[in-house]
Image (cartoon, rainbow, N blue to C red):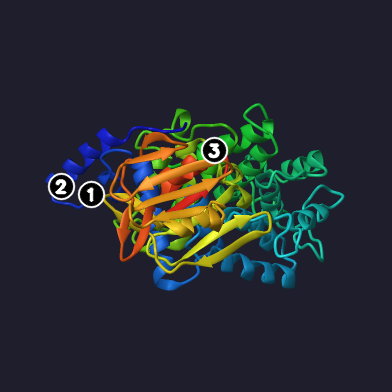
Amino acid sequence: MLKRKYSSLAWVLAVALLLAGTSAPAWALYEKGSVEGAMNSAAAYLLKLEKNGGILSYWSYIALAASGKDLNTTQAGRACENLLAAAKQSGDMNYYTVLVLAVLANGGDPYNYLGENIIKQIQDAQLPSGKFADNVKSGGEQLLNAHIWAILALQAAGAEIKDKEKALGWLAARQHADGSFYWYAEDQKTSDVDSTGMALMALGALGEDMTSPVVQKAVAYLEKAQKENGCFESWGAENAESCSTVIEGLVAVGLDPLTGSFNKTKGDVLAALLGFQLADGSFEHIAGTGGNEIATTQALMALGAISSGRPFYERLKLQPAATSYKARFVVGKKTYAIFSDQGKRNETMDAAPFIENGRTYVPLRYLAYALDVPAESIFWDQKNSIAKLVKNGRTITLTVGQKTGYIDGNPRDTGVAPILKEGRVYLPARFVAEAFGYKVNWDAVSQTVSIITGS
């Protein structure tokens, strides 16, 4: 885990700045768990941005999912549909590769998304040189980023790169004498921090590490490019995105971006990145320019890399596949999602889940339906206020107002008691789901209960 304790430093800086009569930078306000606090704040900002302004960028949904956020209540699905339409119309490789990542983020299958095998289309676009074409229809070998994102998309999806050695060889041949890379592949003179960070991500995805001369040269270039305050710049300005891309690239090849020669005399790249975060959780592109969705998205991805020790494409790979979800309920909403081998479908309830005393309650009948309890196996004893669910030989018995439930006749502490509210029975979602062998995740930001198959 590439974590560093900033709590004491943050506290000292916050106090010092307050005594000096100035406002503390956003990152100094995190007394503990600075990285996780910054991530949660950035994610909350993006979710609020969508709520107030509509569909986010594709990368925002990718960043949220890679940070462990549930996209069930977002418009990620619509974003993916729009991106597929744009990809099919233009043939742009970058659209196809981002679509793979966005579909994975949304719990979908890029091997069969709305009837399209996106993975195969990317694989088939690898040219004899090893380069993934700029355009799946018309080819092209000018764009470094098209090649890089194709590699990362295939890696995230667990897909084969048909000619891996040539893909690596083509990328390595575009490295400049100073160790840098540039987005326009034919330019062998212009050095670019962002392109170099992205190239390191692809090199890591191809299995390269610090034993690779290509990686060593790229890392040496970034060491020289870093400012004494830990920051990085692109196009003549220190900015959040350059810091984020370097963090992801270094983590991808197995390096800790906060230690060694990357820990400069006046700070490291994490301190520099957090210096761009504002009080509302957003990140600025350049200091003083205000919150920016792209900067916030990339910062969220980089903070996730610091926290987990994995680049974003590896974290996407670890997201549960759509078929591993069983159901999702959202507090306050009268629709819930059911997942199966046939995909996702939404069902309607006549009552919504709610939170009471810190616990989430779901209507009895719909929770049972979501867990595949047959209608004839859902029993309600109105006289004694007892609910009984039977599935595959297992019987769950719960009584309204009592914190003791029964699994096959054996008493269990439910933690909370079932509730009778407005003529409907509500059950504690976690106890019932886990009693039937499911795992339950709770996302406090989106207030979503996700029921997942397996342990």
Which label sits on residue 18? 2
Identify the residue at image location x=79%, y=52%: 123
From the top left corner, tell me how far across and down residue 59 is, in percent. Answer: 54, 58
- Give the mark toward the camera: 1 or 3: 3
**Secondary structure type for disc 1:** loop
**Which residue reaches farthest right?**
128
Which label sits on residue 310? 3
Quick check: 314 left or right of 116?
left
From the top left corner, tell me how far across and down residue 137 is, in percent. Answer: 81, 66
Amino acid carrying label 2: it is Leu
Q: Characterize the local packing of mark 3: few (<14), some (14-19) or many (20 or more) Cα atoms within 10 angstroms.
A: many
Identify the residue at image location x=40%, y=56%: 362
Which label sits on residue 24? 1
Q: Looking at the figure, which quarter contains the C terminus?
A: top right
From the top left corner, tell me how far across and down residue 330 is, in percent. Answer: 43, 60
N-term-proximal mark, 1 vs 3: 1
Which label sits on residue 152? none
